[in-house]
Amino acid sequence: MLVRDAMSTVVLTIGPTHTLRQAAALMAARRVGAAVVHDPDAGGIGILTERDILNSVGLGQDPDTECAYAHTTTDVVFAAPAWTLEEAARTMAHGGFRHLIVLDRDEPAGIVSVRDIIRCWIPARPAPAPAVPA
């Protein structure tokens, strides 16, 4: 199975000056664990994850004043849609992260997470059988 088969095509893109609270609200509303941070001035793509926000709050920083750019990972490892899920999982395990931005023609086409890979590798549990009246 390939990354293109597992990735989420819901790509939340935010700007570098979004506050962490704004980013968290957008991530929660879209039910995603990461946002692509596009900074046209810096000329690159970064990623802000739920863990980045959690670390900031854990340090006592104010999510209403902390901006995404201060917590964005900019040395991002990207995946290609044609990668196998094994390649993506190996890359995540080696790098110690849980999300990969998937680039297609140098544009974000999706995000693949560890959870996406697990969903593909482990079949969903069958629904429990309905109770039979006695």
Image (cartoon, rainbow, N blue to C red):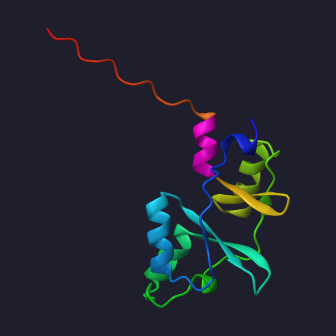
Near-viewer residue (106 or 77):
106
As drawn, 112 above or below 121: below
Near-viewer residue (106 or 119):
106
Question: Residue 22: percent from the left, percent from the top?
Answer: 47, 77
Question: Residue 106: percent from the left, percent from the top?
Answer: 84, 63
The N terminus lies in quadrant: top right
Q: Please name the residue shown 56% across and 74% down the image.
A: 52
As drawn, 89 above or below 25: above
Magenta region, main secondary structure = helix
Please identify the quarter of the rendering in which residue 117 is found: top right
Q: Residue furthest left?
A: 134
Q: Is residue 119 magenta?
A: yes
Q: Please name the residue shown 77% across and 85% down the image.
A: 42
Question: Residue 10: percent from the left, percent from the top?
Answer: 60, 55
Q: Residue furthest bottom?
A: 65
Residues in magenta, as a range: 113-120
The C terminus lies in quadrant: top left
As drawn, 45 above or below 18: above
Q: Residue furthest top?
A: 134
Please identify the quarter of the rendering in which residue 40 is found: bottom right
